[in-house]
Amino acid sequence: LIHEKGGPLDEKTRWLIKVALSTECEYQHALRTHILKALKSGCTKEEIEHVMLLVAPTGGFPKMMEGLLVLRSIMEESK
């Protein structure tokens, strides 16, 4: 599948894009899944936060904040 293999984008970049899209669309289940897969693929918390911050100018501050809260929840659970 193209979202798992192939194409010029590496795995980390693909998952970061999916995190940004899920944040923008406010798909909570998908966002949670995409964050976990991004972390598994080697993305750092800071990289994930960055793509969420990039959502704010286009998607709006509330969507970005909701995404950051989901990320915070995941990071707290993993402690």
Image (cartoon, rainbow, N blue to C red):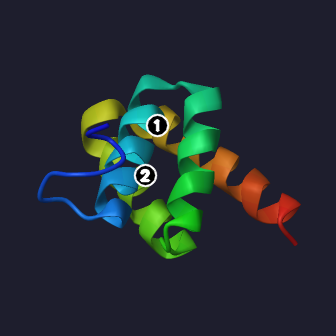
Q: Earlier in the sequence, mark 2 or mark 1?
A: 1
Could you tell me which quadrant the N terminus lies in? top left
> Residue type at mark 1?
Thr
Q: Residue at x 19, y 59 (%)?
A: 9
Numbered disc 1: secondary structure: helix
Residue, far left: 8
Q: Position of residue 15 (x, y in %)?
A: 40, 53
Quarter of the figure with residue 56: top left
x then y, percent, for residue 63? 48, 34
The residue labelled by disc 2 is: 52
Kindly identify the amino acid type of the residue bearing the numbered disc 2. Met
Q: Is residue 23 among the parts visible in the rendering?
A: yes
Q: List the residue tagged with mark 1.
A: 23
Q: Position of residue 42 (x, y in %)?
A: 50, 74
Label 2 to label 1: alpha-carbon separation: 7 Å
**Left or right of residue 46, residue 4 in this image:** left
Q: Are marks 2 and 1 in contact (CB under 8 Å)?
A: yes
